[in-house]
């Protein structure tokens, strides 16, 4: 690939960059060259320093030492705004959209343009969305969008801002295959126009799919760089984390009685998402996968099952040492409040919860220890805590628990904000899945998002182990592979209904794909949805 | 840890810069008013400490501010920004005054002091509490912004007070300003230090400070912090929106209502139209200045009160510097504190000892405030 002189003026080159956070050495003498017109994949295990390198390049964090140049001249951005002016932009791992504002308003807020025109901003964003072949509501407050739409929105705002070097920190962690496909096509077309793209990802097939160059980080060190073409995912994986342990063969499990049950649940959330009479039973000792394209209602179903959203009608039941039942009623504020009360009753009855957005459940301003023990501050816990012997439950040996889930660094006194994205996800898993007492039921949305291969495998095994110990596990994801990796049975949602329920042996990608797209299971040309009687 | 020390050092530098700029601004203002800064300073110090009476005045001024600020801790920690203390003080004072007169009349003027105190205390608390439950209800039921509703209710309370002092609680005597009859002697709070106006309310501040010191380590306190930043997780802890808003606003309302009683029974001996006198707003400022930590709040309340008392001394010493210089200095101080707080939010500050010695600022690095719909996914700031 030849580089025109104009393009040579835009090469971003970091030489021996180091960055320490107090005693933590996040980057050590790392070098990287980002060239125009190519996708540069940046991979490495959780906490390897990928986000830190990205932040240094984008002017968000100053390096402790080392030099960066842009087109051969020194490049020392004081802040993100200056980096943007120089043409380097970044979509951070932790999304930064303002929740109260729509995407258009967010775009207007971040820009440094002297004059803003709402109408032209809107059409610019709409055109960008169009090119990436995705649909996101431009005018709704971003807080009301789904997690994946917020992720897409953040990317689209950055794309619309226009940059010659664009850094995307795990842009695909919460996206489904359809959205990823459109996004990558758009990225490739940007590359053809001479944009340089840095892509941080844990999905190695994506590296093979779009990347030209590859840099591998490990423990803050650069362990490999070179061309990405021709590398197989397994080779990249070996570069990243060494040999992966063999997947343990699936132990036979006995399916017990129904633990978690939804019956004819009808619910409506803020915007388009709704449930239209959902029946679902998860048995003890079973892992059920919940698949569906974004916006099919999986989010809402999990929110109803966790007790956050009261159903309009229908019932949700959790069997355990005692049975908790939520019965639908007219949705009103009062009912929503009662819904809140049920979330804590369900938790007390042994419901573990890993939300789609880990930031709903991890408190960054609290230490790791406090995050692990947060449920000990539940209402009404004090009375029974006093009668029980001390240290029997969650609070015991937080360091051991962190180590068991491979949270790095496993220092209980560290604030959660100091963990890398993937390690925050492990922290969440350590709290929800690592308690001494096996939960009765587990609700997990994308439990392995943002995790490296080894950690993802560990979490999958943990979920299966919990099922073997008698928990009823429900795993939802946009990522079919994540579902297929753990599930004994796959349930597909479309348009707020369950449209397929297949044992894992019959759950071929083809059949699931048809169901997820709302097509009937067999080949008769008859839409599955409109045939169902209206409720 | 080296980083922590470096951060601490920079924080001290920043704090020093704030203090120096306050001194410079105050000095400039004094010179501008045509006075000698050293003479002004002398007047300030004298105004605060030249006699036991003056020290007593500082305490008297710090009591209402301190109580309001301390009882605001839970609300501010939960991100419920109630600015209604002014109105709650007013209503508490009206209730307390009316209750004292009513009890006294019922016993034909022979009511024992203890009974009158209890009546005033309880009635004040009830008045302030009711005044706080109204905006809490509006917030929970119809999502009316609590800053707006509490602010507007302050005007309603002020209007109600004016009407009260001209009608059912008005004194028969000829007075320059509207006021009530003087309270029966038995109803007024005994003074704590003889020869000063410092009353037993001082002890209440000490008690409240201890109570909140203990409370800070409780599960309830953790729940409120979680509620402020992670509403969904808070639901799993049992901290629903209605429960949190009602309970925290009630606590601040009770405190402000009791302040209303204290101002009537301990300071003015009658209900005046100036009963709240900006104490409600100073209380919020002091709570933030004290970083929501009880000790910090008590210190900040004393400081605010001393500044006001000292400025009066300065005015009389120099003759030209208006005592409102205290308000300017408080304003500059608050801005300085805001700067320090903003600085502390730097992401580099994440390596810190786990046990917070001083409470966190009201909102953490990425706390978007309470947008706690169970349904709405969390907004990110
Ligand atoms: N603000 C911070 N304070 C202290 N330590 C930090 C901070 N940010 C990152 N670190 C540490 O730096 C290291 C690298 O973090 P970084 O976020 O770059 O990892 P990453 O490669 O992006 O991992 P992931 O795949 O999990 O996102 C980690 O050990 C992390 O704990
Ligand atoms: Mg990262």
Image (cartoon, rainbow, N blue to C red):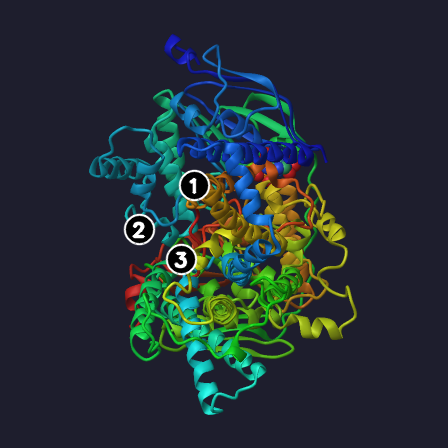
Does residue A279 appear in this view?
no
Q: Which residue is mark 1?
A: B319
Kindly identify which residue carries mark 2. Answer: A140
Taking the image as four quarters, which one is ligand 1 found in?
Answer: top right
Secondary structure at badge 3 equals helix
For the residues labelled 1 and 2, the Cα–Cα distance comes to 60 Å
Distance CA(mark 2)–CA(mark 3): 29 Å
| Residue B135's disc number | none
Q: Identify the chain of the residue marked 2, using the numbered disc in the image.
A: A
In this view, which residue lies farthest toward the top?
A5
Q: In this orientation, does residue A518 appear?
A: yes
| Quadrant into which the C terminus of chain A falls | bottom left
Q: Is residue A494 left or right of residue A321?
A: left
Which chain letter matches label 1? B
- Residue drawn at point x = 50 percent, y = 19 percent: A76
What percent of the width, then of the height, locates residue A137?
A: 30, 48
**Which circle, 1 or 3, is nearer the viewer?**
1
Point out residue A450 in the picture as x, y percentages from the top left corner. Answer: 55, 43
Residue B365 in the image, given as x and y percentages of width and height: 52, 44
Camera-near label (1 vs 2) is: 1
Q: Quadrant of residue A470?
A: bottom right
The chain letter for the residue carrying disc 3 is A
Q: Residues within 10 Å of mark 2 (few under 14, many from 20)?
A: some
Q: Are marks 1 and 3 in contact (CB under 8 Å)?
A: no
Residue placed most toward the observer, A330 or A512: A330
Point 30% across, 51% down: residue:
A140
The count of marks equals: 3
- Residue at x 67% of width, y 49% of height: B357
Q: Earlier in the sequence, mark 2 or mark 3?
A: 2
Local SS, label 2: loop
Q: Which mark is residue A515?
A: 3
As drawn, A230 above or below B113: above
């Amino acid at each position: 690939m030849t580089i025109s002189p104009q393009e040579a003026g835009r090469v971003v080159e970091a030489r021996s960059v180091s960055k320490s956070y107090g005693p933590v050495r996040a980057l050590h003498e790392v070098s990287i060259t980002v060239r125009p017109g190519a996708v540069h994949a940046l991979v490495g295990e959780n906490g390897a320093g990928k986000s830190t390198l990205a932040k240094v390049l984008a002017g968000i964090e100053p390096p402790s030492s080392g030099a960066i140049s842009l087109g051969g001249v020194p490049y020392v951005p004081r802040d993100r705004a200056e980096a943007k002016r120089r043409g380097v932009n970044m979509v951070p791992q932790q999304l930064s959209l303002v929740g109260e504002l729509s995407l258009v308003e967010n775009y207007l807020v971040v820009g440094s343009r002297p004059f803003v025109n709402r109408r032209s901003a809107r059409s610019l964003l709409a055109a960008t969305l169009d090119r990436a072949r995705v649909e996101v509501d431009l005018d709704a407050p971003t807080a009301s969008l789904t997690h994946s739409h917020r992720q897409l929105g953040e990317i689209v705002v950055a794309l619309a801002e226009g940059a010659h070097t664009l850094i995307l920190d795990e842009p695909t962690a919460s996206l489904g295959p359809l959205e990823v496909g459109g996004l990558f096509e758009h990225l490739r077309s940007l590359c053809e126009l001479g944009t340089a793209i840095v892509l941080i990802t844990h999905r190695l097939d994506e590296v093979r799919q779009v990347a030209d160059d590859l840099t591998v980080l490990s423990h803050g060190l650069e362990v490999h760089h070179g061309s990405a073409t021709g590398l197989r995912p397994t080779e990249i994986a070996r570069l990243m984390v060494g040999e992966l342990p063999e997947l343990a063969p699936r132990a036979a499990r006995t399916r017990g009685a129904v633990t978690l049950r939804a019956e004819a649940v009808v619910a409506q959330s803020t915007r388009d998402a709704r449930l239209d009479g959902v029946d679902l039973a998860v048995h003890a000792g079973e892992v059920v996968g919940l698949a569906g394209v974004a916006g099919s209602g999986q989010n809402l179903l999990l929110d109803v099952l966790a007790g956050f959203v009261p159903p309009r009608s229908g019932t949700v039941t959790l069997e355990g040492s005692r049975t908790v039942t939520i019965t639908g009623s007219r949705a009103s504020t009062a009912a929503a409040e009662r819904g809140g009360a049920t979330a804590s009753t369900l938790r007390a009855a042994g419901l573990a919860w890993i939300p789609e957005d880990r930031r709903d459940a991890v408190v960054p301003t609290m230490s790791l220890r406090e995050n692990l023990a947060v449920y000990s501050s539940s209402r009404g816990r004090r009375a029974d805590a006093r009668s029980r012997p001390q240290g029997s439950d969650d609070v015991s040996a937080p360091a051991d628990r962190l180590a068991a889930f491979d949270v790095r660094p496993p220092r209980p006194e560290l604030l959660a904000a100091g963990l890398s994205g993937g390690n925050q996800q492990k922290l969440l898993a350590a709290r929800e899945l690592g308690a001494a007492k096996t939960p009765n039921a587990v609700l997990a949305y994308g439990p392995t998002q943002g995790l490296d291969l080894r950690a993802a495998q560990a979490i999958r095994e943990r979920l299966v182990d919990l099922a073997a110990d008698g928990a009823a596990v429900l795993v939802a994801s946009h990522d079919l592979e994540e579902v297929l990796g753990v599930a004994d049975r796959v349930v597909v949602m479309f348009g707020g209904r369950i449209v397929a329920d297949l044992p894992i042996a019959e759950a071929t990608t083809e059949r699931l794909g048809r169901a997820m797209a709302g097509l009937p299971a067999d080949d008769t040309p008859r839409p599955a949805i409109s045939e169902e009687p209206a409720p | 840890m080296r980083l922590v020390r470096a951060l601490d050092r920079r924080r001290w530098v920043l704090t020093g810069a704030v203090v120096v700029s306050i001194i410079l601004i105050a000095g400039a203002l004094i010179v501008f008013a045509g006075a000698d800064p050293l003479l002004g300073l002398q007047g300030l110090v004298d105004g605060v400490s030249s006699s036991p009476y003056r020290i007593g005045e500082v305490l008297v001024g710090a009591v209402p501010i301190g109580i309001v600020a301390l009882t605001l801790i839970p609300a501010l920690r939960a991100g419920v920004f109630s600015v209604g203390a002014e109105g709650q003080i007013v209503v508490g004072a009206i209730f307390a005054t009316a209750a004292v007169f009513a009890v006294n009349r019922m016993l034909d003027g022979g009511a024992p002091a203890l009974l009158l105190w209890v009546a005033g205390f309880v009635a004040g608390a009830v008045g302030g509490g009711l005044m706080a439950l109204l905006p809490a209800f509006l917030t929970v039921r119809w999502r009316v912004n609590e800053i707006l509703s509490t602010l507007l209710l302050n005007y309603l309370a002020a209007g109600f007070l004016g009407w009260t002092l001209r009608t059912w609680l008005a004194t028969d005597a000829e007075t320059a300003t509207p006021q009530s009859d003087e309270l029966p002697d038995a109803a007024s709070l005994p003074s704590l230090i003889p020869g000063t106006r410092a009353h037993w309310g001082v002890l209440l501040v000490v008690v409240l400070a201890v109570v909140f010191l203990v409370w800070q380590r409780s599960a309830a306190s953790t729940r409120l912090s979680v509620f402020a930043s992670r509403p969904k997780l808070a639901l799993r802890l049992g901290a629903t929106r209605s429960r949190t808003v009602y309970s925290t606003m009630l606590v601040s309302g009770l405190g402000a209502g009791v302040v209303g009683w204290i101002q009537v029974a301990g300071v003015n001996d009658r209900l005046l139209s100036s009963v709240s006198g900006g104490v409600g707003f100073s209380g919020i400022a002091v709570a933030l200045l004290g970083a929501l930590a009880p000790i910090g709040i008590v210190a900040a309340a004393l400081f605010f009160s001393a500044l006001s008392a000292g400025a009066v001394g300065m005015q009389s010493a120099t003759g030209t510097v208006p005592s409102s210089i205290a308000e300017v200095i408080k304003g500059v101080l608050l801005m300085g504190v805001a700067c320090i707080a903003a600085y502390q939010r730097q992401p580099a500050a994440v390596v810190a000892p786990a046990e917070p010695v001083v409470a966190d600022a009201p909102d953490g690095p990425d706390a978007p405030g309470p947008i706690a719909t169970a349904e709405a996914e969390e907004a990110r700031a």
